[in-house]
Amino acid sequence: MSAVYIMWLRELRRYVRSRAQIVASLGQPLLYLVALGFGLGPVFQKAGQGSYLQFVAPGVIAMTVLFSSIFSGIGLLWDRQFGFLKETLVAPVPRIQIMLGRTLGSATVAVIQGLLVVVVCFVAGFRIVDLSRAPLALLFMGLIACLFSALGTAIGSLLENMQGFQLVMNFLVMPIFFLSGALYPLKNLPTLFAAVTRIDPLSYGVDGLRTILIGVSQFGAITDAAVLAALTAVLLVVGSYCFSRIQV
Amino acid sequence: MIQVDNLVKKFGAMTAVDHISFAVAQGEIFAFLGPNGAGKTTTIKMLTTLLPPDGGKLQVDGLDPRTQAHEVRKRFGIVFQDPSLDGELSAAENMEMHGIFFHVPRKLRVSRTEELLRLFDLWEKRTQPVKFFSGGMKRRLEIARALLHTPKILFLDEPTLGLDPQTRNQMWTQVKNLNQAERVTVFLTTHYMDEADRMAQRLAIIDHGRIVAQGTPEELKKQTGTPSLEEAFLALTGSQIRDEMAGNADQMRQVAKMWSARR
């Protein structure tokens, strides 16, 4: 089990040392929060939906966790490119432990990143309705992080070069974000579109966070947690299978 | 220590390793030489459990890398042809990770890390991120790391590629000392024939996936009637230049270059 720990620690060490990257990665959520939060605010208000900043903040937090976790999962590709992957593959450690440590490390980093964005949101004027339930938000952030780290690891195991990365970005990560209800309510949507949002795992993450943080819910927190947990379990199995098949 | 019989590896229609057989005794320094693309790295990958063979038998310390991969992995250390360090972490942290992967008890890990880093002149720089290291320092760290768990066999795949003569000389001296002090079997590949001549007790020359000669450096020189190992090598493998097929990554890089030039 110490291999899981050291792989986890490695991800954290790398994260803490890339200060420029930490700051840079806060730029995008900040932009969404400010540009959309304040830009669309009046329209949202007029439609009788209340404060858009309040509404979009959980979505931006979920987005941060999504991007951070899926990218550090795919970071496996960098390990392959820079060779470190081989060091782990000749180690007398079951590959599942390597994969698990890496995934948990990515997930932890993503949650930390998400917490930083919570602070940013707070500064921008976002307020949590019931502070006593705030720890539950951490649970949802953790679930989103584990789910997408595992997905990232699976993808990172399958991709053999950087070119595929753009493909994944445009055809997987961005759709997951835009179809998740992070930016708009999932109510009164065209049927087909509504169906698509329902198969997007992030919809449940955003909804869970929104339920906890601002008390607005679409599916209900229990359903959200159950869907996320089940999918995380499946993706961990898929991810470790893909990882175990890597050849260098 | 290593026993290979009729080993075969095919990649599609290409036979990378074609029925090769050789043996390496315990404590021996064995050089595996050949032109680019001859099958050296493929053979090392099969011996080190990274690639399943398509035929033949192989044994590492009496164990089969195919079925007893986990046990085999505990017994060897390897320095790959291309770097395999984590550049963001320090030298000490790279050693720490390796020690944990190989289940080296904490106390022993700490003391042996110091001993090896001092031996390879890296102790003063142990807290610096590896990405700031020079090529020679990185290579030395890789060797030190490969030896951390006191392996029975050390695989060195072109460890001196691109290093200056001073560094190469120092590196081989240390490897030889460790070979004598710890009785570690060394399996090396190199393109520098003088290194092979000086280091190896026995060697095998592989070309087009086949072993064309094996024996002591003296035997090979005698066999070909040449004064140096370099000439013996050229006599055995011909002087035609080999081009290795570009890997997937290289090919993609070329495609990317072409497209970006067009735009």
Image (cartoon, grey):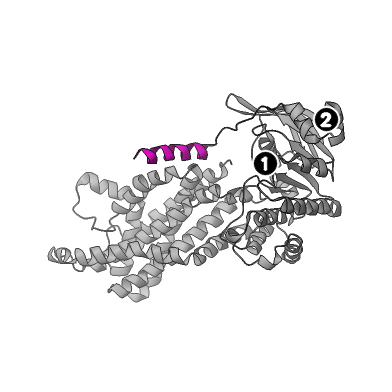
**Is A124 situated above or below A32?**
below
| Residue B202, image quadrant | top right
Residue type for callout 1:
Thr
| Disc marking residue B49 | 1
The number of callouts visible is 2
Q: Residue drawn at (29%, 73%), measured in percent from left and top? A: A124
User: Badge 2, how many Cα within 10 Å: few under 14, some, many 20+?
Assistant: some
Region rendered in magenta: B245-263
Q: Evaluate whether residue A120 shows in this view.
A: yes
Q: Determine the main secondary structure of the stretch shown in magenta.
A: helix
User: Could you tell which of marks 2 and 1 lies nearer the N-terminus?
Assistant: 1
Residue displayed at 24% across by 63% down: A36
Q: Is residue A193 above or below residue A12?
A: above
Q: Label 2 marks which chain's residue?
A: B
Q: Residues within 10 Å of mark 1 (few under 14, many from 20)?
A: many
**x, y percent for residue B101:** 66, 56
Chain letter of the residue carrying label 1: B
Q: Residue, x 81% and y 40% (percent of image)?
A: B197
Alpha-carbon distance for marks 2 and 1? 37 Å
Which image quarter holds the N terminus of chain B? top right
Kind of element beneath mark 2: loop
User: Where residue A219 sits: x, y (%)?
Assistant: 29, 57
